[in-house]
Amino acid sequence: SEKKGVIDTWIDKHRSLYAAATRHDFVVSIRDGSVDLSSFKTWLGQDYLFVRGFVPFVANVLIRAGKESGETSDMEVVLGGLASLNDEIEWFKSEGSKWGVDFSTVVAQKANQEYSRFLEALMSSEVEYSVVMTAFWAIEAVYQESFAHCLGDGNKTPAELIGACNRWGNDGFRQYCLSVKNIAERCLENASREALVEAEDVLVRVLEHEVAFWEMSRGGQ
Ligand code: HMH
């Protein structure tokens, strides 16, 4: 892992899009304390719906990790991710009551629906494991990078948002993202030229979906 892998090469190539996804105005506003709480509530409701759709996607990754990977540890890494989604759903519910967001009335906005459709398409058996793993890494890594930024030196993150930032910004989640990245890198080392082209494309599309997802918070719905 001293040698720069293909994922880091792609991140360098798409650096401005990666920055748009991981340093979005909404995230920066959490870090500098200027965040509009109605934006936070919008994000909370939309992300709760997203996570409910993300669970079957991760379950699909888990099944593939068991069948297609050849490495027994892949399944354990993905299982850890699935287990933390279980906690995450409980966390969302308690956060929903804390902020007075009633999830039963929240409707998925267009960006959220489009992201869900994209995840569903990735669950097709036509999509290679290396491509799915790249997407899975990118989805998790954007949240890890974004929320870790809100906890970094000099932050003015409001006390009531520290818990949210810790969910994805903590060191355990960072380590988990590195494990997923290592799996993706190993798969990509053995991937066909076609799969590499598709994996780069999927990475770019995850970043675009993440930017559009943050953008929903502006609506303050
Ligand atoms: C939009 N992307 C979005 N929501 C999440 N909870 C994650 C990623 C998790 O990493």
Image: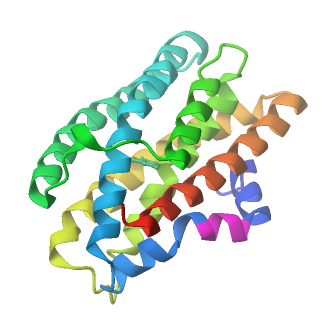
In the image, is 122 to the left or to the right of 164?
A: right
Q: Evaluate whether residue 72 shows in this view.
A: no
Type of colouring: rainbow
x, y percent for residue 157: 27, 80
- Which quarter of the image is occupied by the C terminus? bottom left
Residue 56 place in picture, x, y as percent: 43, 23
Q: Residue at x 77, y 43 (%)?
A: 201
Q: Nearer the viewer, residue 53 or 109?
A: 109
Magenta residues: mostly which secondary structure? helix
- Assess whether residue 16 is covered by the magenta stretch: yes
Horizontal and vertical percent for residue 2?
65, 57
Quarter holding residue 37: bottom left
> Residue 118: x, y in percent?
62, 34
Which portion, as a residue range, is magenta? 15-20
Q: Does 147 sit above or below residue 138? A: below
Residue 184 visible, this orientation: yes
| Near-viewer residue (2 or 188) | 188
Can residue 116 be found in the magenta stretch? no
